[in-house]
Image (cartoon, helix red, strand yellow):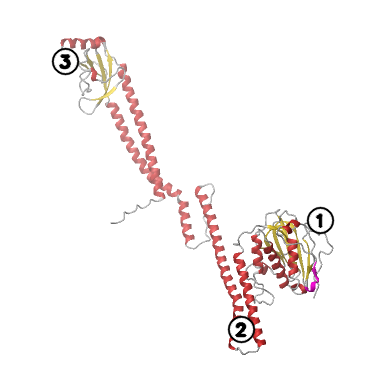
Amino acid sequence: MTAPRRRRPWSLRRRLILGTTALATLAVLVSQLIGFVVLRGWLLDRVDQQLAEFVPPPAAFLDAVETARREQFPPQDPPGRLPSDFRVLFYDASGQRSSLALGTAERPGPRLARTSARLGLPDGRPRTVPAVSGAGNWRVLSHPGPEGVTAVVALPLDTVDGATSKLLWLNGLLLAVTLAGLVAIGGWVVRLGLLPLTRIGHTAQRIGAGELGLRLRETNPRTEIGRLGHVLNTMLDHLQQALRESTASEARLRRFVADAGHELRTPLTVVQGFAELALRHADRPAREQRETHELIAQNARRMSLLVDDLLLLATVDHEPERTPVPVDLTALAADAVSSLSLRGREHTIRTGPWPAGPEDGGTWQSVVTLGDGDRLRQVVTNLLSNALTHTPPGTHIRVRTGRTGSAPGGTAGDGRVHVGSAPAFPPGTPLCVVEVADDGPGLAPEHAERVFERFYRADPARSRARGGSGLGLSIAAAIAHGHGGLVELDTAAGRGAAFRLLVPAADVDPEAADRRGGPPSTGPARGAGGRPACTVTRPGGRDPRREASFPAV
């Protein structure tokens, strides 16, 4: 059993031409029908008016009565006694049709019933009846007369039928010409109107063939096709942008996999080499074996840290949501400085407030945000560790906290490169700021634009002598983004670098932050040997010791 053939769909041009032709044909037919009905009704009214105005003479009624009495059939009246084509027939008082008739006998008369009861002619209302023979029609009207005699006046409808017949032929010819003109002219008009759509189709074919830079020219917002072209151009722009982003994302993924493999290959090679060495030379001295085991453990820790960083980056956006608690960023920064005091023995680290404005330049402020204290502490630790790692000994590092309002273009100074890990905040948003700034060598613009990329290090040799895995700033940016904030960089080559953590501020008392899950208030941070590493002053007061320095050890 063969499957039924599916009808081929009609093209838009064909449907428009057929639709407009059908509508125009219907309009012409309706107008012609209305004209035909109006003309025929007018002609019939003229005939009815003539029938109503003609009344047989009284003598004719008397002749009809006398004829009925004699019950004999005299010859019909000679022609010329009645005007025009009138025909008059009589019915006597008993309702029988009389043999007396007035009018010419050149054409067949109307077909009337033998009795008046079957005439169906109420007084004053005309009626159309067929002729006795042939295809003619008559219009008849009854007139009551004396002694119960009824006269039926009739007029032929040859003139009316002839006029309407010619009108029908003329209408048919006009309809045929109209249809031919609609098909010819309508096809040209539709083709001209669909020309922009045709151009859109050709342009779309070229775009589908790979010319992604092409755009539609029909973008006039005052036309339907123009609005369609504008929407399609917008869609193409979005698709092209999505394609670029997808290509860039794929390239970043490939680079990420390659970088991860490169980072893991070195420690794995070291572990494998020393493990094989230990297996082949089991009789080596204990001191050499211990050195081998320490190197294996050191590289294993290095791989473990790298894997932990990778897992953190992979899960930071998918961690289960925790209830945000108030976090005092000033105390949190003090904890980070204290925890890195041993690494900062060759640097000078100072803490202080972030100036809220020219008039409040040295005033401590409440720096409280809502979030996860452990994660935010990791951000500040990463920023401070980055400054200690990538600056030479003797560099001055400043850790400052405060509140500010966002402004277009960030807070970068003139002549410096400003790079953010996310779009800037709307103007006027109250923000908490933790800044880690140094007066080290800074970063060139080509390096500053990529500092938040995974595994990126400014050292082209990818050496670990003065760098980690290149994931610290990526982790900091991801955690800040999870808190609705960002990490920004303000730097210039030879003029130091300033990393700032910006998160939305919370109107919470700092003391309440300590009691509700924030880091506790700390006194002077201690360095090696219990000596003061720095002095941190809580918001709300000024302390002349608020920028004590790490002692050089």
Pointers 3 and 1 in contact (C-beta within 8 Å)? no
* CA separation in Å, label 3 and label 1: 136 Å
Q: Residue at x 63, y 69 (%)?
A: 309
Q: Tell us which disc is closer to us: 3 or 1.
A: 1
> Residue 238 at x, y = what percent?
55, 57
Residue at image position (83%, 64%) is: 545
Instruction: List x then y, in percent, for residue 68.
Output: 18, 12
Q: The magenta stretch spans which residues?
A: 528-534
**Mark 1–mark 2 distance (CA, rounded to whole Å):** 62 Å
Q: Residues within 10 Å of mark 3 (few under 14, many from 20)?
A: few
Q: Which label was assigned to residue 359?
A: 1
For residue 347, above or below residue 501: below
- Left or right: residue 472 versus residue 239 is right
Q: Quadrant of the C terminus?
A: bottom right
Label 1 sits on a secondary structure element that is helix
Is 530 part of what is drawn in magenta? yes
Mark linked to residue 75: 3
Q: Is residue 446 visible?
A: no
Q: Secondary structure at mark 2?
A: helix
Q: Residues within 10 Å of mark 2 (few under 14, many from 20)?
A: some
What is the three-letter code of the residue carrying label 2? Phe
Of the residues tagged 3 and 2, which is closer to the observer? 2
Q: Which residue is mark 2?
A: 274
